Amino acid sequence: MQPNKTAGAAAMTTQPERRTVSVLKSGEFARKASVLSGCIALFIVFSALTSSFYQPANLLDILLQSSINAVIAVGMTLVIMTKGIDLSVGSIVGLSSMVAADMANSGVMAGIGAGLAVGVACGFVNGVLIAKLKLPDFIVTLGTLSIFRGAALIYTNGQPIYGLPEEFRDLFAGQFLGAPTPVLFAVGIAALAYVMVAYTGLGERIIASGGNEEAARLSGINVERVKIIVYTLSGLLSSIAGFILIARIGAAEPIGGQGFELQAIGSAVIGGASLFGGVGNPFGSLIGAITLGALQNGLTLMNVPSFWQYVASGCVVILAVLADQMTRPRR
């Protein structure tokens, strides 16, 4: 009787699960179009207000500044899609970049491998604590935010690391076929994440787990494993963002990445990720990061004080959350 009961439960939950998965695959075209149109409108407004904004050099600068946030935001989007949050990404950026910079003196590949390993390990720890021990994601990642930051400070006794190998800097902050590699990393990672979410079984499980966790369990999805995977991916992408950061500035600091978690969450939400779970678009997060970058850049060119820039960015994020709450599909 038990197999029949299980099969019956799976059958009962098949339709809701498919409806949840179709939320992303059908695209929510209007929401995606509004994200892109909002970004374009922002560019048009600032171009009209200051002639310096639309200059090619400044537009390239916006893309470069947004690339680090975009890489982190893609990982954050995957976490948010499972109805989670990761406040530790900025600290992972700092810790993994410190380890990578230190080990890179022994070889570029050794530095990259060590930094990636640190990012994966940090994300895995977050995932296990949240999924296996059933601890609240907010509390866990708030705690690991401090732990990972402390570890970065302890690693070099609070001292920065200078003298990164040129090969490392060329890889993560150079050019490839005339295009800046930070931008290529951001676009490539967003594309890979989009393909994973929209066209693979893992993507369907991520959407289903965030849309209706109990229904996902009844249909045979290992929700705990899905959560561990997305937090691990978030840690991995945070370490890559850390590589781009230190390659651009030429040094690694233990406080590197401070505050990046808020920018990543803002970019993911602006890009259409729902804090209610089950909805998200890695390309939307890329556009969200560019939107925030353009907003800060435009206000800077207009000589708006930095503290008002924080106010403006916060207002944009709140409006995005409000729009999400008003338009999110009823399940």
Image: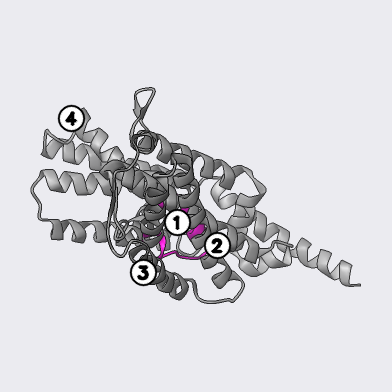
Crowding at label 1, few (<14), some or many (≥20) Cα neighbours within 10 Å?
A: many
The amino acid type, in three-letter code, at marker 2 is Phe
Q: Mark 1 or mark 2, which is nearer the start of the sequence? A: 1
Q: CA distance from mark 1 to mark 3?
A: 22 Å
Find disc 4 in the rendering and name its residue: 55
Q: Mark 4 or mark 1, which is nearer the start of the sequence? A: 4
Residue at the far front: name it. Answer: 106
> In the visual, does 42 lie left or right of 99?
left
The span shown in magenta is 72-90
Find disc 3 in the rendering and name its residue: 150
Helix, strand or loop at label 2? It is helix
> In the visual, does 306 lie left or right of 187?
left
The answer to whether residue 30 is seen in the rendering is no
Foreground: disc 4 or disc 3: 3
Q: CA distance from mark 2 to mark 1?
A: 14 Å
The amino acid type, in three-letter code, at marker 4 is Gln
Q: Mark 4 or mark 2, which is nearer the start of the sequence? A: 4
Q: Is residue 304 above or below residue 108?
A: below
Foreground: disc 2 or disc 1: 2
Find disc 2 in the rendering and name its residue: 124
